[in-house]
């Protein structure tokens, strides 16, 4: 059964065509990488897909959407705001409850930011911020994850750890990324975008980064 | 020749909208200066000046009776007024999209706190409510506006990622409020400093704050007492950031409440009489019935008020405001380096801070009086007093802003740093502050009637002095309308130039 | 936060609602020496309290208008007013009575003073040469610093002061009027004669720089005014007892606050000229 189904979709941004007659079907359980040069339309496509599932997915936008003045704990906790009553949320905002701290700490540990748990996010490095954003998405624990360059600010070792965790926690994964090696290693389907069109769509099995070079050639 | 000049200009690029706006305002100020009543009539100010100088260097801290009480009251009224205004202002900021709230806030902040105090004096007498409401009401209007702008400007990105189905309040608390909170705290502290000034100034109309004694001493030329009172006030303002801790706030508030004097009753009859009769225009109040003659008399009354007081008041107020606005801007750009770590070391900055605290905490009318002695009566002392006061306030805000600015290690120094790095970077923020002060300067022209400049405030003061509240209210409404017009214009300009309320670092 | 707000208001209202019903509250317009005003007038309160057998409290006010308002709102029941403020107050409170005045107040005088550079000499006749110069009144609500000088200016020139003078200011206070004219900031000013004489005695005036050029004809000024509804609260004949207490006041220390030698009887009718002048120049509706 198709979870996402786009049919002849186009999009414009400031009068420029960013998506041109895109048709696309993604089933539950698929792990899909969107690859292509900057400006090829990846972010726009992800946004359309996110709108289609009406917010039931965990979202990792390029701008990580962190609240800079709140601690790592609170930023991760935001992933489950919808599961608790207002009063419970309020109590956690003022003084985090042990139960929640333990749950959040476990995820923060996996992301390697446990020791920063009560520091304001604004004071962290770019990589730590990105991992905080991922931790929040993991904590949200939606079956679907939609991520726009979720590993752009971390080193390769951390990127692998992040992608492994994403795959473990979400059944359906849609991520845009630049690193073709990682894309091949951690997804099972690659969609290549070029000049607002889908120019490639095939399983990753047996693929090598060289096969994707065309997408980046000028 | 001309074509090459034009080409060269085109190659250099057009001046930015910010520069163009600045040039327009300077132009308006120059035109206003031609229309303004500026005249220097010096005689021999030096003996009075000598007395002032002598007083300044020989402050007499024993001359004022109940000095400690006045200090405590100044702080107490400021704390209570600003706290109430913060609570109400925050609540209204959340509803600021409602037109009625926006208009209501614009109206209440358009009236100077001294006039609020004069209105409440008619109703509550010299009860604590008069002082607290006189601060809290206009400040609520200001805070609601600023807080709503801060919320508007806070990063909206976190809103995208909150899981669907979260309650709106939870989302607000986690994703909107925390970003804004930092700015709220900074602004609240700044408001408290303004509150201390207002609280002191309310002493001029009789509240038992420092201004009460300051006014008496000043009127009588007891300059040693004046300087002692001013020094005490400077110290309160300068040390505010040291004693104002969030955790101590409840203690201070309880102390402030307990200190409020009691003993004045609130009489419903007084309130009703004020609202039902005192502020009703004279011809209506005197009329037996509403007939043609009454309406004619009312029309005549309104026309007379408008042509004899409101219109000349508006003209003088605007002329004074426009000149003072531009001079304040120039002053602020000159003064801010005094407290900026980008230009001066720590020791030198202590001196800079002292200078700015002194200039911005000395009530404008005292500054005006000093310059009046020097130059004789005209708009000049008013312009200089208003400009000094406001440039020290804006200079202080910008100077603080530069503290968090990062500059390259190999950046130029001194004048080059000022002209090529700092000035271009702070200029948007500077303009934002200046346009904010615009309506404040307009309100402050109110209290310079001593110079014989018939501003709107001068006529309002006369109406209160003559116990003619109908006239006072008429003129207050005119003033409020003028204020709202200036405020609207200022907002348009700020939004066109994309000037923000909140400081961004960088 | 909301609770805190309620607490504040509850406490405030609680504070205010404790009406001190049986206390006679009085005030005095801020006109003369304001230093240590509270201590000095608290002594007057003690004298009145001892003589009348009721609690008496002094509240200071900052302006003529504030004194009138407090009197009208029954926040004070007895007040030491100027001529104009007294007339205003009695107009607003039916039944209120002028009960006492100083000896000097029967024939009070305003001095027109001029800076030496103005080139005007003292004269018994009104100095027409003042036209076109700069001029400062005292407070807007003052009889001696505003009402009477404005009346005479209008009488002689048939025009409002801002038409007669090149610039008109309101110094807000007699002492400041003197200081402003002495420094030449204003060429001319109108001042309460008592304040002038006091400052002259205190050595604050340099006659080479500023001098009196004209004295107005005498007029009635300061007086004690009492509300008419006090007998109900304080017992029969209370107004008369207050009057008697004031007339019997002999302590020079207490009298120095006003500053008067002693008080004599006064009545509303004594101030009819002030009322008429106020109306004629448009300061009273």
Image (tube, rainbow, N blue to C red):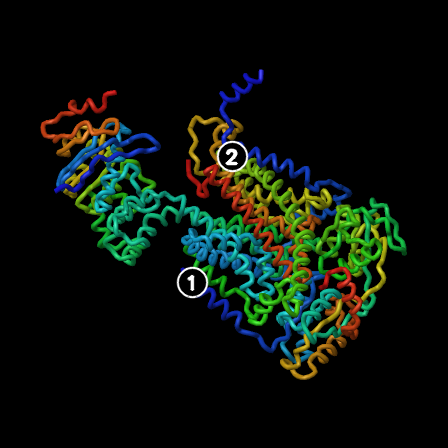
Q: Nearer the viewer, residue C184 or B234?
A: C184
- Asked if A6 appears above or below C113 in the picture, the reply is above
Q: Nearer the viewer, residue B45 or A134?
A: A134
For the image shown, how many numbered marks are present on the structure? 2
Q: Secondary structure at mark 2?
A: loop
Please name the residue that numbered disc 1 is placed on: C4
* Residue B193 point in image, percent of width and height: 52, 50
* Residue B109 point in image, percent of width and height: 53, 53
Q: Is residue B184 visible?
A: yes
Which dot marks residue B344?
2
The disc numbered 2 marks a residue on which chain?
A: B
- Asked if C65 appears above or below C134 in the picture, the reply is below
Quadrant position of the C terminus of chain C in the picture: bottom right
Q: Is residue B224 visible?
A: no
- Asked if B322 appears above or below C17 in the picture, the reply is above
The answer to whether C161 appears left or right of A173 in the picture is right
Point out the residue furthest to the left here: A206
Q: Residue at x 68, y 44 (%)?
A: B379
Quadrant position of the N terminus of chain C in the picture: bottom left
Q: Characterize the local packing of mark 1: few (<14), some (14-19) or many (20 or more) Cα atoms within 10 angstroms.
A: some
């Amino acid at each position: 059964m198709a979870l996402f189904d786009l049919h002849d979709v186009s999009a414009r941004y400031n009068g420029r065509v960013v998506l041109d007659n895109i048709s696309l079907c993604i089933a539950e359980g698929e792990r899909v990488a969107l690859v292509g040069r900057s400006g090829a339309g990846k972010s726009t496509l992800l946004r359309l897909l996110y709108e289609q599932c009406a917010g039931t997915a965990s979202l990792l936008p390029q701008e990580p959407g962190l609240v800079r003045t709140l601690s790592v704990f609170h930023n991760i906790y935001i992933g489950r705001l919808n599961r608790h009553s207002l009063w419970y949320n309020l109590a956690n905002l003022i003084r985090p409850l042990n139960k929640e701290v333990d749950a959040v700490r476990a995820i923060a540990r996996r992301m390697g930011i446990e020791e920063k748990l009560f520091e304001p996010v604004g004071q962290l490095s770019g990589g730590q911020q990105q991992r905080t954003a991922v931790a929040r998405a993991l904590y949200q624990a939606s079956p679907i994850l939609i991520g726009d360059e979720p590993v752009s600010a971390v080193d390769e070792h951390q990127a692998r750890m992040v992608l492994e965790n994403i795959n473990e926690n979400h059944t359906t994964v849609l991520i845009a990324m630049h690193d073709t090696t990682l894309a091949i290693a951690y997804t099972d389907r690659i969609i290549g975008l070029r000049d607002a069109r889908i120019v490639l769509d095939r399983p990753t099995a047996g693929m090598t980064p060289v096969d994707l070079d065309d997408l980046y050639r000028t | 020749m001309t074509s090459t000049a034009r080409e060269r200009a085109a190659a250099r690029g057009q001046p930015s909208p910010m520069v163009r706006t600045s040039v327009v305002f300077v132009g308006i100020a120059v035109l206003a200066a031609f229309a303004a009543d500026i005249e220097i009539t010096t005689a021999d100010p030096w003996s009075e000046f000598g007395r002032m100088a002598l007083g300044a260097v020989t402050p007499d801290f024993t001359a004022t009776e109940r000095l400690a009480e006045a200090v405590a009251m100044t702080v107490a009224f400021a704390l209570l007024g600003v706290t109430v205004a913060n609570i109400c202002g925050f609540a209204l900021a959340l509803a600021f999209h409602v037109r009625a709230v926006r208009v209501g806030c614009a109206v209440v902040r358009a009236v100077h706190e001294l006039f609020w105090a004069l209105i409440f004096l008619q109703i509550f007498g010299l009860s604590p409510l008069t002082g607290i409401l006189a601060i809290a009401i206009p400040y609520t209007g200001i805070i609601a506006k600023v807080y709503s702008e801060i919320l508007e400007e806070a990063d909206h990105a976190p809103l995208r990622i909150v899981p669907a189905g979260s309650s709106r309040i939870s989302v607000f608390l986690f994703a909107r409020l925390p970003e804004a909170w930092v700015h709220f705290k900074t602004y609240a502290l700044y408001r408290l400093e303004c509150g201390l000034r207002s609280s002191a100034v309310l002493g001029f109309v009789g509240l038992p704050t420092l201004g009460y004694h300051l006014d008496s001493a000043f009127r009588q030329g007891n300059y040693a007492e004046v300087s002692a009172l001013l020094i005490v006030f400077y110290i309160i303002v300068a040390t505010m950031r040291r004693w104002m801790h969030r955790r101590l706030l409840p203690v201070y508030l309880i102390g402030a409440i307990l200190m409020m004097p009691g003993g004045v009753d609130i009489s419903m009859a007084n309130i009703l009489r004020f609202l039902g009769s005192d502020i009703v225009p004279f011809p209506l109040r005197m009329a037996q019935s509403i007939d043609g003659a009454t309406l004619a008399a009312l029309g005549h009354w309104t026309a007379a008020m408008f042509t004899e007081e409101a219109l000349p008041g508006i003209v003088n107020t605007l002329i004074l405001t426009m000149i003072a606005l531009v001079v304040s801007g120039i002053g602020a750009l000159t003064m801010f380096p005094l407290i900026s770590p980008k230009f001066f070391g720590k020791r030198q900055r202590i001196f800079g801070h002292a200078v700015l605290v002194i200039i911005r905490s000395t009530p404008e009318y005292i500054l005006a009086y000093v310059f009046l002695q020097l130059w004789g009566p005209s708009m000049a002392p008013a312009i200089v007093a208003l400009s000094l006061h406001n440039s020290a306030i804006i200079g202080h805000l910008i100077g603080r802003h530069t503290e968090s600015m990062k500059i390259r290690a190999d950046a130029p120094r001194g004048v080059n740093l000022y002209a090529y790095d700092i000035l271009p970077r702070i200029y948007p923020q500077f303009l934002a502050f200046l346009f904010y002060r615009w309506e404040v300067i307009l309100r402050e022209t109110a209290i310079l009637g001593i110079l014989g400049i018939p501003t709107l405030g001068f006529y309002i003061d006369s109406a209160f002095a003559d116990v003619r509240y109908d006239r006072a209210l008429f003129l207050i409404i005119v003033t409020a309308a003028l204020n709202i017009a200036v405020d609207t214009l200022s907002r348009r300009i700020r939004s066109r130039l994309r000037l923000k309320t909140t400081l961004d670092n960088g | 936060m909301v609770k805190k707000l309620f607490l504040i208001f509850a406490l405030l209202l609680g504070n205010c609602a404790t009406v001190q019903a049986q206390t006679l509250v009085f005030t005095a317009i801020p006109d003369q020496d304001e230093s240590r005003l509270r201590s000095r007038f608290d002594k007057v309160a003690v004298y009145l309290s001892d003589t009348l057998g009721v609690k008496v409290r002094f509240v200071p006010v900052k302006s003529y208008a504030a004194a009138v308002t407090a009197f009208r709102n029954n926040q004070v029941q007895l007040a030491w007013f100027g001529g104009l403020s007294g007339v205003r107050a009695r107009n607003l409170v039916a039944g209120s009575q002028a009960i006492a005045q100083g000896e000097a107040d029967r024939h009070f005088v305003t001095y027109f003073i001029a800076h030496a550079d103005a080139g005007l000499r003292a004269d018994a006749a009104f100095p027409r040469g003042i036209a076109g110069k700069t001029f400062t009144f005292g407070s807007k609500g003052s009889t001696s610093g505003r009402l009477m000088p404005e009346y005479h200016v209008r009488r002689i020139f048939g025009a409002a002061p801002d038409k007669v003078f090149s610039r008109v200011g309101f110094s807000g206070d007699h002492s400041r009027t003197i200081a402003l004219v002495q420094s030449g900031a204003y060429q001319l000013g109108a001042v309460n004669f008592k304040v002038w004489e006091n400052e002259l005695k205190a050595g604050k005036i340099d006659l080479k720089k500023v001098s009196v050029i004209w004295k107005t004809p005498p007029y009635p000024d300061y007086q004690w005014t009492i509300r008419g509804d006090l007998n109900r609260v304080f017992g029969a004949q209370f107004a008369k007892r207050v009057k008697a207490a004031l007339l019997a006041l002999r302590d020079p220390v207490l009298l120095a606050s006003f500053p008067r030698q002693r008080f004599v009887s006064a009545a509303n009718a004594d101030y009819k000229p002030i009322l008429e002048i106020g109306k004629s120049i448009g300061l009273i509706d």
